[in-house]
Image (cartoon, grey):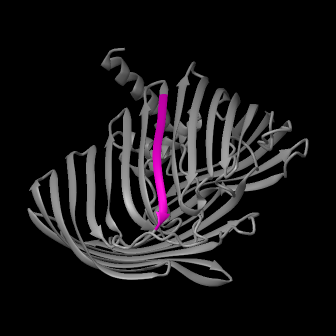
Amino acid sequence: MNPEELARQLAERDAQLLSAARAWRIEPSVGALVTATSNSGFAFSDAERDVIVDIEPRLLVRGRGASFTLEGDVGLKRLIYTQSTQKNRLLPNGQIALNANVVDRWLYFDVSALAEQVAADPYTTRADGESSLNKINSLQYRFSPYLQHSFTPAVSLSLRSDNVWTDRRGEFVGTDPRRDSFVKRDSVLFEQRPQPLGFSVEAAQETTEYRAGIRATVLEQTQARGVVTYALDPTLIVGLVGGKERSIYTLSSTVDTIAGLRLNWAPTERTELRGVYEKRYFGNGGSLQWTHRSPFIAFNFTAAREPSALGTSFQLNPGAGDVATLLDAIFTTRYPNPSERAVIVGNVIAGLGVPSVLGSPVEVFSDYAQLRDSVTLSAVFQGVRSTLAARIYAVKSRQLTQADAPLVPIVGLQADNSQRGFAIDFTRRLTRTLTGEAGLGYGSIEGLAFASGQSTRNTSVRFGLTQALSPKTKATVGARYLRTDLSTIGSEGSAKELAAFAGMTHRY
């Protein structure tokens, strides 16, 4: 296909997507899915067959006013096991977020609520499809007021307070330390952007509390930094970092200096590399992020080494590598309006059946501070008829300690682990109304320290076809295969599941 024809087809498709974009969009929908499974409980032996009925009403809301934006996509999944081999469940899922400008160019706030399911036991089977097995509900609420103002094009001030409450509800074993949590991070940043010399003054305090009858502070960090920056050219900025920090965590308290380097390289408006290296109390730390976008492809590479209590990094610094975010980057040049672009991304995901989130590490609850090393690469390619999304990750979490102190594992700390995995999803429009989809996923987790000897590997394969019956109704059929290999001290086993599914979704 020549470039002119490709450009014409892209323009036609974009025009169709744009026609669906409105300042306000309220769209209820209902979906029903029937799954016949060969092993409803993912048992190693004596597998039980069942037919699972999944009924899910959803509500999509998107809107933008003069001083606010509102986005929500929430649903309530009802799972019914017709042969009663597992418990019937009602599973809420979705997110709603509001951003408001209270005082123009000065005062703002973000409010959001998130409902999702996480693994009750990370070292056992995690279902790849519709299942109530090994799931607990996680509800998260966030309130973030902030002041942000630019005095000149080069001088700015930012003050922000992030407050995140997490409530986990489900059935836990007696030794599970899981509990509700509250994460608070207050920060201030005054910056003079380099012309070619610049500087910034930064301060932050972050506290993670767990609540089980009484409050227990798991990790508290207070930091102050001064950064001197210099623009070697308009695309390349380097910086020197110096500062002080105080940290309180599991049976330890430390005060130490911070010294490091920063790099920001943006050779084009579509490509950016940001790096931070710092010498801190736990040793070498920092982060690296490389992003690139074009009209056809977007990718995000991130690597980080940082102290954390469960959820801190993910709640306050969410990753930018999910499918919806990468599709948003692909459409940035053609649709500069963020609200308009969000509608178009939603239409692509719903129309092609592209998953909004690919495989990611499983939550392992930790009631003590850890040092987390993580690497993630996510990419999305979108052509006229095909979409390919992929992610690969590796995460290692272990007990946090000072760099010059010997690591002496504390009895009872059993959340140290190493995880790696990948997910690939390919979608192709076969005809104007028929779409084919295939997915492959793998994830492994291995316990470390006192959890050594426990490991789980999950492998999944999925195929499906989606037929548009009308502009607002589609039908889906497909099959999946899941294999789980478990290993504990003194025992090993494998569980397999083969399932076929068929369903229908209608948008009102």
Residue lying farthest top? 1
Residue at (54%, 53%) from the top-left corner? 62
Q: Work out which quarter of the rendered image holds the C terminus and state it.
A: top right
Highlighted range, magenta: 387-399
In the rendered image, the vertical position of residue 1 relative to residue 400, given as above or below: above
Q: Is residue 323 visible?
A: yes
Is 449 left, or right, of 44 in this rendering? left
Question: Toward which corner of the image does residue 155 lie, by quadrant?
Answer: bottom left
Q: Residue at x 41, y 23 (%)?
A: 9
Left or right of residue 76: residue 99: left
Quadrant of the rendered image containing residue 139: bottom right
Q: Which residue sits furthest right?
A: 83
Residue 490's spot in the image, x, y percent? Answer: 70, 50
Q: Work out which residue is located at the far front of the displayed protein and give it.
A: 490
Instruction: Give the percent coordinates (x, y) of residue 217.
Output: 53, 81
Would residue 86 be found to the left or right of residue 201 on screen? Answer: right
Q: Which residue is nearer to you in this view: 322 or 296?
A: 322
